[in-house]
Amino acid sequence: MTQVVNLTEAAIFHIQKAIEKRGAGIGIRFGIKKVGCTGYAYVTEYVDQPIAPALEQIFEGFTVFIKPEDERFVTGLMIDYTRKGFQEGFQFNNPNEKARCGCGSSFTINTNE
């Protein structure tokens, strides 16, 4: 099976620790939603029970869930987890993005619609 999203070792480690700290969970969902000044923003949410229907990718001790409607927008997405000073979080490198807004919280995407 081809990977839809890829995670760096830092992202894998963070997700493993976050699930462990929560004391529950089987994985995380990555997707997009319509918001912001340029159209879309990334969605991340921890998952306690399987999501159906969803594409599932197994990583080291957890599953990444991607809803079918998000798959074409996140295919090829590289997810990292970084810490810079007092800020930390997931960093998304998506080959489907066309541009990001000035604040960096939303983006436009090749939708082919």
Image (cartoon, helix red, strand yellow):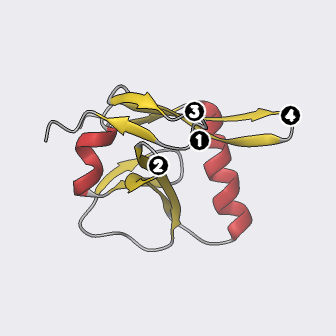
Instruction: Locate residue 57, reporting x and y percent.
Output: 36, 48
Q: Looking at the picture, which amino acid does disc 4 mark? A: Gly
Instruction: Locate residue 93, reporting x and y percent.
Output: 47, 29
Disc 1 target residue: 12
Task: Classify mark 1: residues with Cα within 10 Å, few (<14), some (14-19) or many (20+).
Answer: some
Vertical position of residue 22 compared to residue 36: above or below: below
Q: Quadrant of residue 75?
A: top left
Q: Which sits in the foreground, 49 or 89?
A: 89
Q: Looking at the picture, which amino acid does disc 1 mark? A: Ile
Disc with the residue nearer the chain's start (4 vs 3) = 4
Disc 4 target residue: 85
Residue 102: assigned label:
3
Disc 2 target residue: 42
What residue appears at the point 47 percent right and 45 percent down from the top-left corner?
59
Vertical position of residue 71 compared to residue 50: above or below: above
Helix, strand or loop at mark 4: loop
4 and 3 marks in contact (CB < 8 Å): no
**Drawn side of residue 12 relative to residue 82, left or right:** left
Q: Nearer the viewer, mark 1 or mark 3?
A: 3
Task: Classify mark 2: residues with Cα within 10 Å, few (<14), some (14-19) or many (20+).
Answer: some
Disc with the residue nearer the chain's start (2 vs 4) = 2
Task: Classify mark 3: residues with Cα within 10 Å, few (<14), some (14-19) or many (20+).
Answer: few
Disc with the residue nearer the chain's start (2 vs 3) = 2
Q: CA distance from mark 2 to mark 4?
A: 22 Å
Visible residue check, residue 81: yes
2 and 3 marks in contact (CB < 8 Å): no
